[in-house]
Image: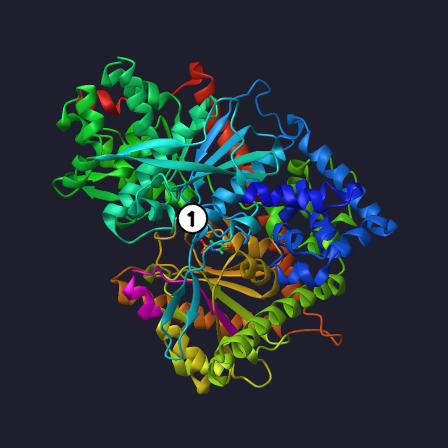
Amino acid sequence: MGFQEGQEIIDLLPKRIERLAELANNLWWSWDEDGRQVFRSLDYELWRASGHNPVKQLRDIDPAKLDVAAKDPAFIELYDSVISKFDSYMSRQKKDWCGKQVPNDFDGQVAYFSAEYAIHNSLPIYAGGLGVLAGDICKQSSDIGLPLVAVGFMYPQGYFHQHISAEGWQEEVYQQLDFSEAPISPCAWPQGCGPLIAVPLADRQIFLQVWQVRVGRVNLYLLDTNISDNRQEDRGLSARLYTADQEERLRQLIVLGVGGVRALRELRIKPMVWHANEDHTAFMMLERLREECAKGTPLKEAVEKVRQKTVFTTHTPVAAGQHIFPYQLMDRYSRNFWESLGIDREIFLKLGDYSGLDAEKFSLTAFSLRLAGQANAVSKLHGSVARKMWSGLYPGKPIEEIPILSITNGVHSPSWRAAEISKLFEKQIENVASPGEYEELFWKYANDIPDDQFWAVHQLMKNRLIRAIQDRAQLRLVRDGVSTQQVLAMGALLDPYALTIAFTRRFAQYKRPYLILSDSERLKKIVTDPLRPVQIIFGGKSHPADYASKELLKFVYNAALDRRFQGRIAFVEDYDMNLARDLVRGVDVWLNTPRRLQEACGTSGMKASMNGVVNLSVRDGWWDEAYNGLNGWAIDGFKGGNPEDEDKSDADTLYNLLENEIVPLYYEHDRKGIPHHWIQVAKEAIKTINPVFNACRMMKEYVERMYTPVVFPESTYSNPLIEKEHF
Ligand SMILES: *Cc1c(COP(=O)(O)O)cnc(C)c1O
């Protein structure tokens, strides 16, 4: 399918612009403004109608338009300059590794495994922050020339689209992805290899086909079980992200880990570092352990060999977030592993054990920590939580010495920062040599940007956001005939001149979306003040099987329906990357209210700060290390007590900040309507967040602190864990 279609597109394209097909099939355009401009100017209507998806656009375009473009000097000039930019990007050397000295001789291929990737909306294979991180890691690795290959799952139905019923219940709409309009192609196998990968699953084999996604210079390989060689029930295994059925989930994870390793072997890729993103990918380690043992290496040595090349990133600060499977299920699926290799079942199962775990249970996080020589948490605070949480795995070690490092997440700034903001700064400084320098040096000029210019850009983005939200609401009215009340709840009355707060993220109890709604009288006064109105935009998906989260969503949606708030509270449906991009650029305040110590990092607030949107957040995750007293607001001061006390204290702090500081500051402006003191805070955020919380800094840390010790073992670490416990 995809491939033939691709060929047809190439045949259709006039020779002069035939490389449009190649451009469309490399997601580089998704973060390069000029790359997008080519497709935008080719056919703007179709660009919008396709959801900014050039593959679909080229499939649907009227050939006559292509002929016109091929003869239009203005288009040709743009096309040529973008092709030349693309070629020079693709052939760039490693010289710009974040502009700093990363070991020159580092040449190891890094194999990165993740269950989800958020790269662009045309490839809906992500649910939230974990996927955004994985996508940003691919893009940033490409930018800095890090030789990374990524492995994941092709979910033909992806994550669901969200509708909210008139009563506020989430409805999940699954759409089958049309592969001919997705930026994927069948894997290009080396001569004589592929095209199928076999993975044993209990009593039978399951076969996978592999898709390839080009993310700049990084290749992402996606595994797909939907082929006729498989039984009907197996074909659907990769259909959806995060199935709720435990056994089905286990089967998915085995296919991802084992199938991923086998696919890389078949591709003749020889990774020097294996990086597991969260415990979803743990079976990648098991498969490599099997390979070692199959060579005759004794288990203990095999474990050591796997550890030497494995890096593991943990993302959850709560035990409930990890994958735990009963022995009975593990037996069913791992029996052929230990039986065929003559390994003692008890010893094997102990690899997933830790003190505090229920009997007869196997923890994938414990297994991953044992099989990875290097492990990290995703913010400084999360590091200290994780070291305590997993101390049972490292008996006798003082907490500070537990080998789980902290590498704070960062976001890929070209994807998340508005080009308009970057352009303001580019006017101030020329000759930036590398992306790393760019991220480090640029932002100190924030105070040189004239406030009126800064505010004009901000208002432009705010208008764009409100327009996008109202377009969505209008579409639902026209296409699906939702009620007027629902259209209002979806943000029809949003006002570009009101102070605008966003609370959009995955719906989870610990993130406490209810906090700002907890005192409705006090909130009503804040939002409906006629002179200083405030509006709040909510959004986010509940996991389809999480009933409590759906109840919470219903509660929030009902606030949006509540006439007392006069249309100042909105709930936007179907929160995704596309909407997130508009939101992090276009609101005034980014609100985050997790129960403290439960947000491992959080990245949406970084995206907001990069655009001069100010954070108002509990001091948790990344904000605990980013907040400096001037670059936003921190919800702090809880003195201890039970969760209800914490809610009360934090809600009170939140309302106080809004009433006494945030609203007054926002509405304090000069005669031209420029809020200079507010802009001061926004610029301070830009200045302090951009240089640190970007993916360039993050990848530099991964290379220096995690990958380099693996590639150069003389600088290696020692982790006596395995010997002490089990052998
Ligand atoms: C950035 C992003 C996230 C992560 O947000 P946090 O709540 O800050 O962890 C989730 N979903 C989407 C669509 C995003 O763009």
Q: Which residue is mark 1?
A: 155
Between residues 507 and 1, which one lies in front from this camera angle? 1
Q: Residues within 10 Å of mark 1 (few under 14, many from 20)?
A: many
Residue 180 drawn above or below residue 674: above
Name the residue type under label 1.
Answer: Tyr
* Percent coordinates x, y for residue 331 in the rendering: 16, 35
| Left or right for 433, reference 666 | right
* Percent coordinates x, y for residue 59 in the rendering: 64, 52
Q: Secondary structure at mark 1?
A: loop
Residue 314 drawn above or below residue 427: above
**What range is drawn magenta here?**
534-552
| Left or right for 197, reference 581 | left
| Left or right for 196, reference 65 | left
Magenta segment includes 535: yes
Magenta segment includes 699: no
Q: Quadrant of residue 3?
A: top right
Q: Quadrant of residue 440?
A: top right
The residue sitting at 40% across, 33% down in the picture is 260
* Percent coordinates x, y for residue 193 in the rendering: 47, 24
Between residues 299 and 592, which one lies in front from this camera angle? 299
Examine the rendering and report whether any part of residue 128 can be seen: yes
The residue sitting at 57% across, 29% down in the picture is 146
Q: How many marks?
A: 1
Q: Quadrant of the C terminus?
A: top left
The residue sitting at 43% across, 24% down in the picture is 265
The residue sitting at 34% across, 28% down in the picture is 372
* Percent coordinates x, y for residue 395 in the rendering: 21, 30
| Left or right for 665, reference 327 | right
Between residues 122 and 18, which one lies in front from this camera angle? 18
Residue 285 drawn above or below residue 499: above
Examine the rendering and report whether any part of residue 409 can be seen: no
